[in-house]
Amino acid sequence: MINKYEFGIPFETDAVVKQIKKASGIPKGVQINCDNGFSFKCKIDSDTIVYGLGQSIGGINKRNHLYSSFCSDDPSHTEEKQSLYGAHNFIIIHNPSDSKSDRAFFFDYPGKISFDIGYSKIDEIYIYAERSDIALYEILPELEENKNPLINIVYQFRKLIGQSYIAPLWAFGFMQSRWGYKTEADIRNVYESYKKENIPLDSICLDIDYMKDFKDFTVDKDRFPELKKFSDDLKTKGIRLVPIIDAGVKIEDGYDVYEEGVENNYFCKKQNGENFVAGVWPGKTHFPDFMQKQVRHWFGQKYKILTDMGIEGFWNDMNEPAIFYSEDGLSEVVEALKKMDTTNLDINSFFQFKDNVYKISNSIDDYKRFYHQCVQNNKSVAVNHYDIHNLYGFNMTKSAGEELASIRKGKRTLLFSRASYIGMHRYGGIWTGDNASWWSHLALEIKMMPSLNMCGFIYSGADIGGFGCNSNRELLLRWLAFGIFTPLMRNHSALGTRNQECYQFENTIDFKAIIEVRYRLIPYLYSEYIKACVNSTLMFKPLSFVFTEDSRCLEIEDQLILGDEVMICPVCNENAKGRVVYLPEDMIQVRFKADGTIEQQEVKKGDIYINVPLNEVVFFIRKNHIVPIVNACENTDSLDYSTIALLGDVNGTNSYLLYKDDGVTTEIDMTSNIVELK
Ligand code: MIG
């Protein structure tokens, strides 16, 4: 059951697809105050667990931390950070001792909103926003038919926000990326190096350097003289190119995207009616006003320039939007600095000086300097960006998603975004942004997967190996051994960091062993992915969502249930030869050895230590469940479903329902595309 409450005049964010009649009053047992902004308080017991919040720092259990939804380009994801790139205002309050009283809340509010989950007061959730215009959805479990309250809450929420974006099958192949590939020769070298080491690969990303002077929808002819020919040629080898698109449009006379945008008033404006100027990679840019339907149509149609060159996938970046500086902000800072007598700064003035410079990028002042033209209640109104900040990346990706659907009629396109808001999950996936080559970030990415799934983001994954900082062989292998399970499996790294392609390290055969396990699992992973999207279920679940009577499972944050069959338990400690795994029930341990053989053995419930060499993958299959695998192959084009073999509890009576289709047409038929395997 879903109750909708409205306070003030909520902004129509398009997060929700289902019309719910608004209820009067407020949810039971909570305190809401709208006098000075919005505040929501409710008590929690000492054993209450709070799930949700999608992409964020912290655990699967969000307690004890302060979070803030405000899409942020902050590449330093340290523990104290409150905001990452996404804004996913959904929480589930779970009472393990009385799960029937579980409930969830979705705060449909497009501006900055903070979640104090037992941080200020140990027994209180306190949620607050500067404005009191908010739509609040309360989700209560439907308890008939012995439904699992947590899974049922997620199901209802996902129905409310609509079906998740569905990626093509090839997007489940391994993807290599790096900020720094500049030319066709660089890309060809990546392909050839993987080929030489016999490591499977499906796609290579083009980061910003493929563009001419970082102009969206242009290609630098010196670096990529014939992108179409190159892309067609790579496709015959099973490799697809995935170019990046940035939010800002370079200001340059003669550049058609810029000129059309200016002519038609498609860019975000300042209060005085001038186009807002932000400094990003291309230099001075304007931001398309993605809140306008005609702008979404116009910008989205530009992707055709690249699909005409054979491109079938994109990643949308810098769409928080990231602002290095604004023209106005910069001149204010320069003025302020000029006023300071830098020859004789006292210490406080020095820090003021430093702060002035430091706060130039992604500043709140800048977000308050520009406006969107939005349709609200069927009327066109100017809305300050700051108030709807979290909708920008969403609408950039909606623009691409909607238009690509018409450009590539009937065919799926790979699309993933950096910034997001709930609702965007219908148009694209996300990657989790600029993490670092830290072991703690491997652990963090594991925890994020189920939280993202709760919020509708199923096609997602991290920069494997870590984006910032220097990775190393062991970290990359361990990260890959987790990444083989996530829909988006991409190795990506930042300019200036150590080269991180698998072939840069010793004994590449170990990388081949791990990545081949991915390819052997693709039919299963793809099938589970489609089921999660279509049936509004979680592809990755915390153990506590499944083993509801087992209190140990409430604490486990480094093991996940994948689909209904598998329990994964990645190694995320440095120099570890293995790890302790908790088995809530007897299971079948599956070990993929480096030589391609598979060992299976029954294991009793309880704590066990498993040995996991760097070139092996170990996971568990639940009793009465089976998992299909296929032979290893070099890319998804050569996946051979005729080689299906079954793992797990194979006894002729247990079966697995495999979803299988051509991997590209948009129609998903859950009847004729299902094969029963036993
Ligand atoms: O300011 O395009 O998150 O994946 O490699 C950095 C360069 C801009 C940030 C993205 C990252 C990408 C990088 N971009």
Image (tube, rainbow, N blue to C red):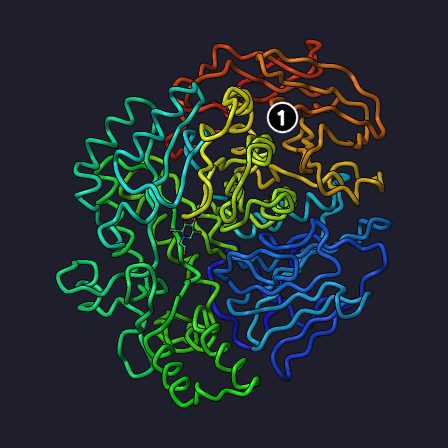
Q: To which residue does mark 1 refer?
A: 614
Residue at point 31% right, 44% down?
A: 404
Give the amino acid type for the residue marked by disc 1 in the picture. Answer: Leu
Residue sitting at the far front: 343
Residue 138 in the image: above or below residue 300: below
Left/right placement of residue 628 relative to residue 651 reads: left
The number of numbered badges drawn on the structure is 1
Expressed as whole percent of the image width and height from the top left, the position of residue 270 reads 33, 78
Left/right placement of residue 123 relative to residue 285 reads: right
Q: Quadrant of the N terminus?
A: bottom right
Residue 234: which quarter of the image?
A: top left
- Residue closest to the eye, 531 or 473: 473
Residue at point 65% right, 62% down?
A: 80
Residue at point 71% right, 36% down?
A: 559
Residue 510 in the image: above or below residue 18: above
Q: Quadrant of the C terminus?
A: top right
Expressed as whole percent of the image width and height from the top left, the position of residue 374 reads 37, 70
Q: What crowding class fits label 1: few (fewer than 14 Cα within 10 Å), some (14-19), or many (20 or more)? A: many
Expressed as whole percent of the image width and height from the top left, the position of residue 440 reads 65, 46
**What secondary structure is found at the residue carrying circle 1?**
loop
Expressed as whole percent of the image width and height from the top left, the position of residue 616 reads 63, 22
- Residue closest to the eye, 506 or 376: 506
Residue at point 50% right, 49% down?
A: 468
